Image (spheres, grey):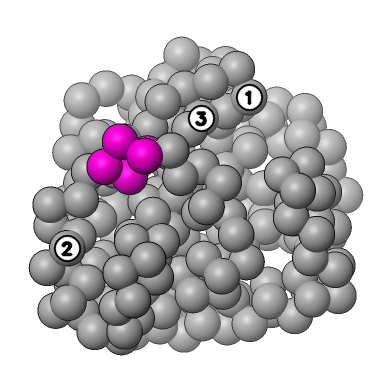
Amino acid sequence: MQIAIDGPAGSGKSTIAKLVANKLGFIYCDTGAMYRTATVMALRLGLALGDEAAIMAHLKDLAITFKPTPDGQQVFMDGEDVTLAIREPETTNNVSQVSALPAVREEMVRRQREIAATSDIVMDGRDIGTTVLPDAEVKIFMIASVAARAQRRHKENVAKGIMTPVTTLEEEIATRDHKDSTRSVSPLKKAADAIEIDSTQMTIDEEVAEILKLVAAKVQ
């Protein structure tokens, strides 16, 4: 079974996707982490973030791997742990530009589909239900207010030692929403057959329970 969870930045989709995957015994794939890793690579190499050819020249041989941990997962770039680096403000504020490059998206979608072909999977991102896994049996589109998403991101960042003010996060999230929803290739969009969940006032347990209920309905 394929479960696609899409939504804007900070909507809680990665947290929920990990928990749902764990409950079901499915593989979890964080597609956002893949684009963030490509962004870290480009920034470290000093590449122009709009230079598709230069980025692709390095990305095609870049190994992006994941390792499950009790708290979620670690992300590796050519064997280096970049779990924290991909969440730094510089990465967050530039990932939309890198992820909008057509060739980068094509490469990542290819990799994501390869992962999904191996077993039951929960995959989260912005174009999973519309582009990556259009035939997924369960499609979720998660939303939440900008204020709620900024508070969640702030809490996550503080736990990682990243002290960005909430007001700054609100501005960054609103800007990211606009970039992601207006890009020309695979924009952030709710799939026609996706179920929308507004998590603004919901607890994590309530969100997980709601998705598990939708999955159970599909397998009956």
> Mark 2, residues whose alpha carbon is within 10 Å: few (<14), some, or many (≥20)?
few
Which badge, 2 or 3, comes first in the chain's sequence?
2
Q: Amino acid at mark 3?
A: Gln
Q: Which residue is mark 1?
A: 71
**Counting other residues with Cα less than 10 Å from the Cα at mark 1, is it few (<14), some (14-19), or many (20 or more)?**
few
Q: Secondary structure at mark 2?
A: helix
* Residue found 46% across the figure and 85% down from its top: 182
Q: CA distance from mark 2 to mark 1?
A: 30 Å
Q: Nearer the viewer, mark 2 or mark 1?
A: 2
Which residue position holds label 3? 73
> Residue 67: x and y, percent?
41, 25
**Main SS class of the magenta portion in the image:** strand
* Residue at image coords 24%, 84%: 51
Q: Crowding at label 3, few (<14), some or many (≥20) Cα neighbours within 10 Å?
A: some
> Disc number at residue 92?
none
Q: Nearer the viewer, residue 80 or 199?
A: 80
Residue 92 higher or lower than 54, as above or below:
above
SS for tag 1? loop
Residue at image x 30%, y 69%? 45
Q: Earlier in the sequence, mark 2 or mark 1?
A: 2
> Which disc is residue 58 wearing?
2
Question: Is residue 113 shown left or right of residue 140?
Answer: left
Q: In this orientation, which residue lies closer to the viewer: 117 or 216? A: 117
Residue stretch in magenta: 76-80
Q: Position of residue 36 (x, y in %)?
A: 43, 58
Work out whether 27 lies above or below 45: above
Is residue 97 toward the left or the right of residue 140 in the image? left
